[in-house]
Amino acid sequence: MSVEKRAFKRTIYQVRDEDAALDIVQDSMIKLAEHYGDKPIGELPMLFQRILSNATLDWFRRQKVRNAVFSNMSAFESVDSEAEFDVLEALAAGVEPIESAEDTTRRTQILREIELQIQELPARQREAFLMRYWEEMDVAETAAAMGCSQGSVKTHCSRAIQALAKGLRAKGITP
């Protein structure tokens, strides 16, 4: 799979919006070309991954601000609004039901706990885990990027998975 497709797939997984994911990946590639074109070719994949990660975080920050602004503005709407929301019309139009606040909170807490557990991993385990399972790089690509043997990558990933499973179980999170 090409770098662009992997980056796009990763970004869709994160932001859950194809258009936003495409924009993020394209902006990251442009930034890489503009600012790092003079770097050795071997450094470009890792630079691109860092740029992509930062661009994705920036997108989330912008979304958070935008959502806060619009949710605060909705408080100014009139209670006597002429256009009332009709659940049946929304369902007939194919609008998917909105996730409950409890489900959203629980999902957010679980994702945050997973992120914290990943951050707690030793650096090499974290690096191998993210490349293999987040970036979907194969063992050989990961080994080349990390500058180690394929066996080391497998060992780091296995230990990372065991540590994550143990840490999440300790927090009461089970599959």
Image (cartoon, rainbow, N blue to C red):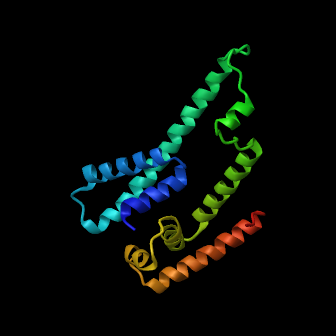
Question: Residue 23: where, in percent of width, then height?
Answer: 40, 45
Residue at image x 71%, y 26%? 85
Of the pair 121 and 27, the residue shown nearer to us = 27
Q: In what quadrant of the picture does the N terminus appear? A: bottom left
Of the pair 4 and 126, the residue shown nearer to us = 4
Query: In the rendered image, which quarter is residue 145 located in?
Result: bottom left
Residue at image x 73%, y 67%? 175
In screen coordinates, is 34 left or right of 76? Answer: left
Q: How many marks?
A: 0
Q: Is residue 72 above or below residue 149?
A: above
Query: In the rendered image, which quarter is residue 121 located in?
Result: bottom right
Question: Residue 63: where, in percent of width, then height?
Answer: 54, 38
Question: Residue 27: where, in percent of width, then height?
Answer: 36, 47
Q: Is residue 155 above or below residue 172?
A: below
Query: In the rendered image, which quarter is residue 163 located in?
Result: bottom right
In screen coordinates, is 10 left or right of 91? Answer: left
Residue at image x 65%, y 56%? 111
Question: Residue 59: where, in percent of width, then height?
Answer: 48, 43
In screen coordinates, is 8 left or right of 64? Answer: left
